[in-house]
Amino acid sequence: MQQHEYDVVVVGGGGAGLRAAIAAAQASDGNSRIALLSKVYPMRSHTVAAEGGAAAVTRDDDSLQAHFEDTVAGGDWLAEQGVVDYFVKHAHRELVQMEHWGCPWSRQPNGNVQVRRFGGMKTERTWFAADKTGFHMLHTLYQTALQFDAITRFDEYFVLDIGVAEDGDEREVTGVLALDIKTGALHCIRAGAVIMATGGAGRVFKFNTNGGIVTGDGMAIAYRNGVPLRDMEFVQYHPTGLPGSGILITEASRGEGGVLVNKDGYRYLQDYELGPETPLGKPQNKYMELGPRDKLSQAFWHEQQRGRTGKHGTSDVVYLDLRHLGKAFLEERLPFICELAKAYVNVDPVHEPIPIRPAVHYTMGGILTDAQCETPIQGLFAAGECASVGLHGANRLGSNSLTELLVFGRLAGEQAWQRANARRNTPAKSDDMTAKTQYWQQRISAMQQNPKHAAVSSWPQLKQDLVATMERGCGIYRDEAGLQQSLNDIHELKVAYQRMHVADSSRGYNTDLLQAIELGFSLDVAEATCLAALERRESRGAHQRLETEYQQRNDEQFLKHSLVRWRDEQPATLEWQRVDTTLSAPKVRAYGEQGNAQASTPNRTQGGKV
Amino acid sequence: MTQPRTCYVDISRYDPERGDQYPTMQRVQVPYDDSTSVLDVLQYVKEQVDSSLSYRWSCRMAICGSCGVMVNGIPKLGCKDFVRDYVAHKGVGRDHAANDAPALTIEPLAHFTGERDLVVNMDEFLTHLEAVKPYIIDPASRPNNPSAATHSQTPAQLARYQQFANCINCGLCYAACPQFGLNPEFVGPAAIALAHRYNLDSRDHGKHERMQVLNTHDGVWSCTFVGFCSDVCPKGVDPAAAVNQGKVESAKSMLIQLFKGSSIGDSRS
Amino acid sequence: MSYKPELTGRWWLKHGHFKRYMLREATVIPLVFLLCSLLAGVFSLQDVERFSQWQAYMAHPLVIIGHTVALGAALYHAATFFVLFPRVMPIRIANYTLPARLMVAGQWAAVLAVALLCLWLVTGGRV
């Protein structure tokens, strides 16, 4: 087995991973060795599919306080308020940094950066690059990273595990174990710090906006090594995915003035406490289509129950109408949306409304970290969608996550370098890397050697069962019976997974094996999601329960983070963690007219510290 | 529901570990409807027929650039190319399966080294991409200078390079370029388009450095304007235009250097 | 553990786009023929007999066919070139990019003007 030594290992080549690698290289003045591992070439990472934009307070009539309040209220008071505070203060400088690195932000005629409206945001503060913001950010970061000699890329390396050294109660990370996809060889890459930046787990659900690689690998690796997953029950449904494929139609479509109508052409959002109806072509922040994603997806569900949705193929749909915006404007601001609608549902948005329905989009929860992105395992950091640094609470506001990649990617990179630098001259501790290597070698050959008779499943079958049960029991609205059923299904699938057969026994580019391993990761993440959803017997943000007694937010019992802990060959366990609400005490979360009425009453518990 | 239509597809298979010297074709019968993409076909084969099939994919929405393949000899993004367009072309009735001639032949991207099945060596392309220094070069910029303001860039200045910034690095243009096929050292369409994108960016000061690469035989001058690269580009980048605009720039910079008396390729002025 | 596909000399037969490209490049052959004919004409100006021989050569049906092919080749090459031109040298005036179609039309107008000028010269201004 090949051994490597680095200061910092970054796992994941998306926005957060690249930003972290650059930050670590800069923090060390180039005097460091940074390994950037990614299971795909970095520009394939799913950051590439983000469309709408990145939020930061920009306009003179905006304030850090307003961005803070929008984010905390958007997250239904489950965000870590100190973290949100740090975030809003560092957002703008990160977007400026991207501008210096060449990101092609859309501009105003005077040459300044343009900002657009986004759901749940009080003021226009979302920077964008047409409707391919994530794509442009990712390529800008990838290309910028090419300049740094300190960064060594390991493209198409699949990380299986981390090494951990235990010293009494102290646990330290010692590196990663990775599989070189091209050759099938295992590599042990030791480092003073490891940053997980592996993205979300949307592929745990059947109908989602995510790429095939979004399988929760990094979450599962940290989780299996004793780091709790936090707030996993909060899964964001994006209100506008294309039927059939789930392909994302950006929220910016609504920010720029698009409206949602049901099969009767009625703007149904006014029936769900988001009204009154705003005039066509005059979107108003936090009203109607510019409400937050959880509320809009929930409104779809109610329309569906009332039989007011249309049909596209076998899918129930509502419609996103952009026609009034006109061809020239759509081509300037939403060219990719036009391209996607034409290619995948054969609809030209200039002339027809786009059929859409909610699709799983984002995992608010993730690997538990402190405010410096470090997990309970010393030297193990996490940033981006795989992490739960505590920014999003129970519901993420659109355009906060692209900025999150930058703010917390940089922070994780700098902190990781500091940690690695401090550990540079300390003697290496004995860790479990050898044992883990043996485990994975055995695990892989077991999968390939398990007898292939009819009773033993293959990963495609198990995966289909997993995504189906998650969709059934863990969707936009949930109840005890459905969640318990899904949790039982997952436990059964985990048993079946142990006996699963992988037909392909070759080493190089064995995608059969990789997808099988990914499924194992997904199963663990799914279990955590279901368990947390089952135990949270209230409705908050993206987590909505159908039972009458759980339909309201219950701060008395559940103003807490859920923490799910993994146990080997036993069901996971759950505990609760207190939430930081020192800057803004919880109050009723309201949008539309009610939100406006509420905004005039002051609510902060401690002055204007933000 | 009507019975799903099916058609035959030939897929190029190659696994050196099984002792394959060259690829062979595997014929598979696959179901399809009006929304079935070539990528969906590959997913079907992998999950239902033969799980050993290897190919790259992720976003399935034509933005990550992973799933480039040759479909009937033409470079395509698997996720943005649809079976309906091929069976319609053949003019065959509702059930294409009656005729077991393949409607589609799916092969790895041409001109790249084949690694396994539909997986090719993308490093051959990324090496060229890195060679053109595709990032803002600005001697005046200081790293991590958050207090600095953004540059001013008008929509017109943005429009000059925006098209060339839309490249998703899928490599289809390299599979379309016979000059790259004949000479793998040719920097190639996407990399030159990216170099051009930064040369045209009002914030950049690195044109001189990039022209050192573009001025060479393996730079813009390997291009004979076949133009197929732009035809196959799934994002409308028009790399052929970038390469040939690069020739104009190259000619200019060579003339300037000629008058200055320094040899091409080593000037640092 | 990999294979490198080799491009054979017949690569351009693979599909229509490459064939059209080769046709564009091949337009040089009839044009060389035309150029040789004209050069021969220039040299034949030295004496009357050789000039009348050249005139007879130029009137030969095969030569006329060859030159007609050259005219076609020149027009085909021009057509392909004119379409490429706006992509290679886009013309921008302030915020406005000249539409490609206008540039192509402009080039054809120039061809027409040159053709008319030649006709005027040949006919000695009688047209």
Image (cartoon, coloured by chain):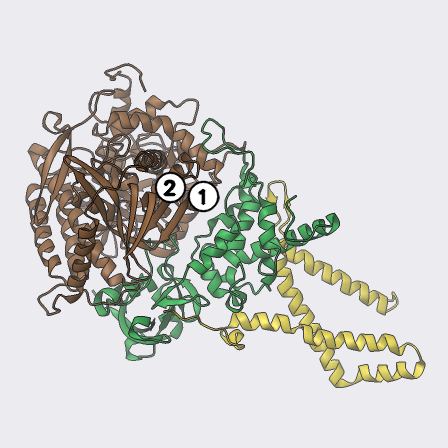
Chain colours: A brown, B green, C yellow
Name the quadrant containing residue A66: top left
- Per the image, the residue denoted by label 1 is A148
Picture coordinates of residue B225, whole percent (x, y): 59, 63
Residue type, numbered disc 1: Phe
Q: Is residue A479 visible?
A: yes
Do tag 2 and tag 1 residues touch (Cβ < 8 Å)?
A: yes
Which SS class for mark 1? Answer: loop
- Left or right, A207 with respect to B72, comes to left
The answer to which of C51 and B147 lies nearer the viewer is B147
Q: Chain of mark 1?
A: A
Which numbered dot is residue A21?
2
Amino acid at pointer 2: Ala
Q: How many marks?
A: 2
Q: In what quadrant of the picture does the C terminus of chain B appear?
A: top right
On residue B158, the disc is: none
Neighbour tally class for label 1: few under 14, some 14-19, many 20 plus, Cα within 10 Å? some
- Report the residue at 38% width, 40% height from top: A19
Q: Is the residue A276 above or below the residue B57 in the image?
A: above
Q: Nearer the viewer, residue B260 or A589?
A: B260
Residue A253 visible in image? no
Residue appearing at x 36%, y 62% in the figure: B78
Say which element carries label 2. Answer: helix
Q: Residue B32: x and y, percent?
A: 28, 67
* Residue farthest along the top direction in this orientation: A607
